[in-house]
Amino acid sequence: MANPNPLRTRASIAAGRATAWLSRRIGFGGGMIGGRVALKLDPHALRRLGRDRTVLLVSGTNGKTTTTLMLASALGAAGEIASNSDGANMPDGLLAALVAKPHAAYAVLEVDEVYLPLVAEQVDPAVVVLLNLSRDQLDRVGEVRATEREIRAAIGALPFSSVVANCDDVLITSAAAGAAHPVWVGTGRRWHEDAASCPRCGGAIRHHDDGWACRCGLARPLPSWSVTGDRLTDPLGTGVDLGLRLPGAANRANAALAIAAAACVGVPPELASARVREISDIGGRYRVVRRARHSVRLMLAKNPAGWGATIPILAEDTPVVIAVNAREADGRDTSWLWDVPFERLRGKQVVATGERCADLAVRLRYAEVAHRVHRDPVCAVDSLRGGEIELVANYTAFRELVGRLTA
């Protein structure tokens, strides 16, 4: 069959693949650079490479990489899948994933929430998965309600897409309410701090046992899928046991959304859940690393909502090392630390580390959490008495630690 892409697109793809190969050869990795080169040579390459595929997009503030991996795993029996499993979720990273597998019939793509409107317009997705919306990288992303409005407009312009949305998140429900084909999932998530008021009218959101509602009429929809404990109930009223190897309610929510999205393209829930429950590691997250006298569990928490999900799964009576950077990929603004419920760490042995350990130490002091300060996270681990350690880091600190501790 003849290649349907014009010469310019084929040339940009070839140049991108060559650049990625060269980048890997010289030790710089090959992820986004190939996509960046291809987009420079052909700004329409994303639209053209997304054509004639079944595209599923995953977006939101927290859980994108995990849910994308779960969804790609659930679709594993459907054929070859293009996916940006490395978390490169801006347009050049998405294009790199499509360039790497130009003949894959399916594409499962993690998309930064700011870029979701642009990407959705270009690739005409079969499914859009909306996880949650909360404050994150305010210096780059801006106010979360502005993001909700932009996603709401983009969803309203997709007449054929199924939108799998977390109906326990007020902002996500508002964004997805105008979808032509909504699929509501009750995840049981309970992070309310970014949606005390209605994104439509500004009125107070009232929370109750059965959900939430505003006086303007915006309210929690009746979910067709719902998580209760470790069980996911489907639209037919039957259910599957999740039985995840990944800890916590947040991962059960991610799995529910992934399984519901897979069902939209014909994957039975039993098969999808069986594939999802095999996952135990997402780019090093939750990995347990042996280091000399220590057993270190690595976790990622990059904003208040992420910390709200992480603190409940920290082991009791186990020291906690917290690493915080503030580079471009993290967001330069560290004011988010003041919205993290660090007070729950009182009584634990805590070490503040990372490039912004001083900012973290001030926050811990006001939370009345006894702690020590050590700028280097690995040295901080080595300074503790032997045994188990929980190491929680934000984005760039986590990526560096995975490399250092698992090399």
Image (cartoon, helix red, strand yellow):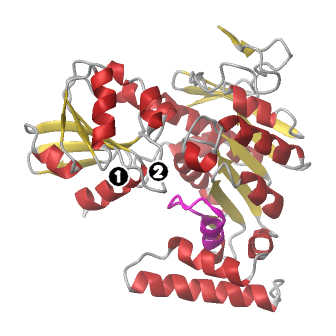
In the image, 309: left or right of 382?
A: right
Q: Which residues are magenta?
A: 83-97
Residue 84 lies in the magenta stretch = yes
On screen, residue 272 above or below 14:
above
Which numbered tag is attached to residue 179?
none
- Residue at image x 62%, y 47%? 141
Q: Which residue is mark 2?
A: 330
For mark 1, give the secondary structure.
Answer: helix
The N terminus lies in which quarter of the figure?
A: bottom right
For mark 2, give the secondary structure.
Answer: loop
Crowd class of label 2 (few under 14; some 14 to 19; many from 20; radius 10 Å): many
Crowd class of label 1 (few under 14; some 14 to 19; many from 20; radius 10 Å): many
- Residue at image x 11%, y 39%? 384
Residue 317 in the image, given as x and y percentages of width and height: 20, 23
Which numbered tag is attached to residue 397?
1
Residue 44 in the image, given as x and y percentages of width and height: 79, 75
Kind of residue at disc 1: Ala
The answer to whether mark 2 and mark 1 are in CB contact below 8 A is yes
Name the image quarter holding residue 91.
bottom right
